[in-house]
Image (cartoon, rainbow, N blue to C red):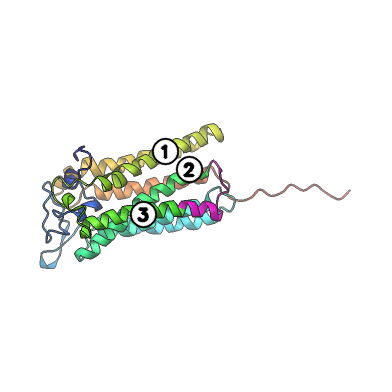
């Protein structure tokens, strides 16, 4: 299990397959294909020239996730009267971007170093931005602003874009050493406070606030209880995925002779969590506007 030392990524990279690890010098991306973190090296499927295709299961699940999420965007569009319909579609679209990037950052396609680092910067920025958009979906549910308006969409997109650019820039500057400001983080213990706060801590805060706000909305404002089953289910599925990623991953890698690790299950359970979140949102919103009741005008 990864070290709890604040800002350090080395032990996380030793025990898990995280996209952020592509930025550091001990990663196969920047170390000539050699794995330098220690721990269990994920090898996956052998290819020609001594290359390997790793995390094929994750790649397949990412493809399924993209298709499933596109279907949910289409279904959301049919819920004409649903509060936060456009905002939910924004979240689902951001999740698709995350999954596309994951194919090339966590999925072990043989890529040039520059391409993988670029995908990693986009991936990390998209993760932070998508969870911020999810939090804003909870805020929209209280209807402090009219949902779906240019103002609502603009505020969410603008703030998410700021987080995306900030996180992405730090990641790319770390990986490409544009300014050399983050060069100290390239080596063990890979201490990078900016990425640690934005990539590791901020998403947890956003998720916690999302679940708190949605719980208040359902129990106190709507006065319902059944949707809490879906909300609790989504939280549980996400937590299981994180346990596979950070705790079980290294043990799974060792027991399967370097073939798979916890990333496959993290990708799967995250997809299931997103689908359950959509079901939760659908359960507390209307599908269509109610038909007006007109009286009989004839006597």
The residue singled out by tag 1 in the image is: 209
| Crowd band around label 2 with a 10 angstrom C-alpha radius: few (<14), some (14–19), many (20+) | many
Residue 145 shown in magenta: yes
Residue placed under numbered mark 3 in the picture? 164
- Residue located 48% across and 43% down the image: 138
Q: Residue furthest right?
A: 299
Q: Residue 122: horizontal and vertical position, in percent?
A: 31, 58
Query: Which of the 4 image quarters holds residue 94?
Result: bottom left
Reading the image, the residue beneath label 2 is 138
In this view of the protein, can residue 252 be seen by the observer?
no
Dot 2 falls on a residue whose secondary structure is helix
Real-space CA distance between mark 3 and mark 2, rounded to the nearest whole angstrom: 20 Å
Q: Secondary structure at mark 3?
A: helix
39 with respect to 246 (left or right): left
Callouts 2 and 1 close, C-beta under 8 Å? yes
Q: 182 or 61, which lies in front?
A: 182
Q: Earlier in the sequence, mark 2 or mark 1?
A: 2
Q: Residues within 10 Å of mark 3 (few under 14, many from 20)?
A: many
The answer to which of 219 and 75 lies nearer the viewer is: 219
Give the mark nearest the N terminus, 3 or 1.
Answer: 3
Give the magenta-colored segment's residue range: 142-156
Point out residue 283 in the picture as x, y percentages from the top left corner. Answer: 52, 43
Residue at coordinates 21% horizontally, 60% vertically from top-left?
A: 176
Q: Nearer the viewer, mark 3 or mark 2?
A: 3
């Amino acid at each position: 299990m990864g070290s709890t030392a604040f800002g350090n990524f080395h032990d996380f990279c030793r025990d898990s397959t995280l996209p952020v690890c592509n930025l550091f010098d001990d990663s196969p991306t920047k170390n000539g294909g050699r794995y330098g973190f220690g721990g269990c090296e994920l090898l996956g499927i052998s290819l020609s020239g001594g290359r390997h295709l790793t995390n094929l299961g994750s790649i397949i699940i990412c493809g399924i996730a993209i298709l499933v999420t596109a279907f949910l965007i289409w279904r959301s569009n049919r819920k004409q009267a649903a509060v936060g319909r456009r905002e939910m579609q924004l979240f689902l679209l951001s999740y698709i971007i995350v999954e596309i990037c994951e194919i090339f950052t966590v999925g072990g396609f043989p890529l040039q170093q520059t391409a993988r680092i670029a995908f990693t910067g986009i991936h990390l920025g998209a993760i932070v931005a998508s969870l911020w958009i999810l939090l804003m979906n909870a805020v929209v549910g209280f209807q402090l602003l009219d949902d779906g308006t240019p103002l609502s969409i603009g505020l969410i997109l603008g703030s998410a874009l700021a987080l995306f650019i900030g996180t992405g820039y730090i990641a790319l500057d770390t990986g490409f050493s544009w300014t050399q400001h983050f060069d100290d983080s390239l080596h063990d213990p890979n201490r990078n406070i900016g990425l640690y706060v934005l990539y590791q801590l901020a998403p947890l805060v956003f998720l916690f606030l999302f679940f708190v706000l949605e719980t208040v909305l359902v129990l106190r404002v709507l006065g319902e209880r059944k949707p809490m089953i879906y909300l609790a289910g989504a939280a549980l599925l996400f937590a299981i995925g994180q346990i596979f990623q950070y705790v079980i991953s290294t043990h799974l890698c060792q027991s399967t002779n370097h073939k798979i690790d916890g990333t496959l299950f993290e990708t799967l359970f995250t997809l299931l969590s997103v689908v359950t979140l959509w079901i939760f949102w659908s359960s507390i919103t209307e599908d269509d506007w109610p038909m007006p009741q007109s009286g009989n005008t004839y006597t």
